[in-house]
Image (cartoon, rainbow, N blue to C red):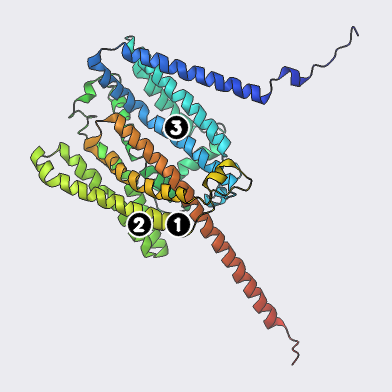
């Protein structure tokens, strides 16, 4: 009928969620292909002599953020498994009702996946086209943006979760109060990212000294060079934080196992500093004396850490329930109760514990592709470790709660018996 306004259905205007999701995936692949194409063409445009040096510098700027992005993706997978297995991780970490779910974690990881490679592509493109000053501004702007988002004082970008992270980091830096599970859990993760912080230190050092997009910093004895004493100091800091946490736990609980745990973290200190001595002693002295000590300390640290993972952090005395989902799922069928899962986790943990020693060694950091691969594998090892460590804590909390309930029931029964005044003989 003419003159009658018929309302248009919103279902016709708005695309279906499946169609919208496919469109986003298509855009993501187009973006990824464009970044790879522009980056590859930019690298190939450079001379062969400068290509490796330039890639090494670009790697040092963006390697830390790429590994952090990978960590966030894997943490989202951890949370998804916990939710499917009915593990109350919010109670374990003492989170409030506004804590991030796995979907929100993946949303953050998606934005990180887009922003970091885009900045890296712009850096490669601008530098290869002679725009050195603009290229140098790319990592600086990215680092400043990350720092500003973390401390942004307004209620956007998940402020409560950001400040929860910052408060936990502050308690790790200064363990002056009782150590909570989230404190030493995050500190353990930081030990797996020691080399990430070392690269961050070198990147910030070059930014402060205006050495971005130059090769001046490749001089070994420069303030940001490979001989800098700051590199082993930054590498050892996460282990020292965890060491002091263990001492604080012993002060509060008087449990001797906390001292043995502190000893485990102290074994990483000789690995780091003996390795750094290569740049400060004569080559013969390093080969004949310090290198055997470094190898011995590396083996000790790897085996001690592996033993502690399996027997203390995981307590794999029986098959765990972490992969038993509340609803039938493909992953639950593949992983729950399968012996190969535990053989794989134990075996890969031993191998990756040994290769992680390579990553802690300051004198081996020149091979940046190998170092990046080993760093990524260490993050994957920690990803596996989280499943069993969180479940072990969940089992302990449930056992403690059941014990308290049983004790309360017994106490109530005793009170009833004592208060009863009628007795039939």
Mark 1 or 2, closer to the camera: 1
Residue nearest the viewer, comparing 295 with 331: 331
Q: Residue at x 57, y 35 (%)?
A: 103
Q: What x and y, as percent, mark residue 379?
A: 40, 39
Cα distance in 3D space between marks 1 and 2: 18 Å
Up the image or down, 37 lies above or below 241; here it is above
Q: What x and y, as percent, mark residue 283?
A: 10, 38
Q: Which residue in the protein does label 1 denote?
A: 316
Name which of mark 2 and mark 3 comes first in the sequence. 3
Q: Residue at x 30, y 42 (%)?
A: 355
Q: Residues within 10 Å of mark 1 (few under 14, many from 20)?
A: some
Up the image or down, 197 lies above or below 141; here it is below
Q: Secondary structure at mark 1?
A: loop
The answer to whether residue 57 is left or right of residue 14 is left
Q: Which residue in the protein does label 3 denote?
A: 69
Q: Residues within 10 Å of mark 3 (few under 14, many from 20)?
A: many
Q: What x and y, as percent, mark residue 263?
A: 30, 56
Q: Which residue in the protein does label 2 denote?
A: 261
Cα distance in 3D space between marks 2 and 3: 29 Å
Residue 225 appears in the rendering: yes
């Amino acid at each position: 009928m003419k003159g009658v306004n018929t309302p248009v259905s919103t279902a016709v205007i708005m695309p279906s969620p499946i169609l919208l999701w496919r469109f986003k995936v298509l855009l993501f692949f187009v973006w990824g292909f464009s970044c790879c194409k522009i980056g590859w063409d930019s690298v190939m445009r450079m001379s062969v002599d400068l290509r490796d040096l330039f890639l090494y510098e670009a790697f040092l700027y963006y390697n830390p953020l790429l590994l952090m992005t990978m960590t966030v993706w894997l943490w989202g997978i951890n949370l998804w498994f916990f939710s499917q297995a009915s593990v109350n991780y919010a109670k374990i970490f003492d989170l409030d009702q506004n804590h991030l779910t796995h979907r929100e974690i993946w949303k953050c990881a998606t934005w990180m996946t887009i922003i970091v490679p885009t900045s890296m592509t712009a850096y490669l493109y601008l530098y290869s086209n002679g725009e050195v000053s603009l290229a140098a501004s790319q990592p600086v702007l990215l680092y400043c943006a990350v720092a500003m988002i973390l401390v942004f004082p307004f209620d956007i970008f998940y402020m409560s979760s950001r400040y929860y992270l910052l408060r936990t980091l502050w308690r790790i830096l200064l363990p002056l109060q009782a150590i909570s599970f989230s404190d030493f859990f995050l500190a353990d993760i930081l030990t797996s990212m020691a080399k990430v912080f070392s690269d961050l230190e070198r990147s910030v050092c070059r930014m402060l000294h205006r050495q971005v997009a130059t090769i001046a910093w490749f001089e070994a004895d420069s303030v940001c060079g490979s001989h800098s004493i700051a590199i082993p100091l930054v590498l050892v800091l996460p282990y020292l934080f965890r060491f002091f946490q263990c001492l604080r736990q012993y002060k509060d609980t008087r449990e001797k196992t906390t001292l043995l745990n502190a000893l485990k973290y102290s074994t990483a200190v000789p690995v780091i500093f003996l390795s750094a001595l290569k740049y400060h002693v004569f080559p013969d002295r390093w080969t004949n004396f310090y290198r055997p000590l470094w190898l011995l300390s590396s083996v000790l640290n790897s085996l001690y850490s592996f033993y502690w993972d399996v027997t203390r952090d995981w307590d794999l005395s029986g098959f765990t329930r972490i992969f038993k989902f509340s609803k039938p799922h493909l992953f639950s069928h593949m992983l729950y109760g399968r012996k190969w899962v535990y053989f794989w986790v134990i075996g890969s943990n031993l191998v990756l514990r040994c290769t992680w020693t390579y990553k802690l060694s300051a004198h081996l950091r020149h091979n940046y592709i190998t170092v990046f691969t080993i760093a990524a594998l260490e993050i994957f090892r920690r990803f596996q470790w989280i499943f069993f460590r969180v479940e072990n804590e969940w089992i302990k909390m449930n056992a403690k709660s059941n014990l308290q309930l049983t004790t309360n029931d017994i106490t109530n029964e005793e009170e009833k018996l004592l208060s009863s005044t009628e007795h039939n003989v």
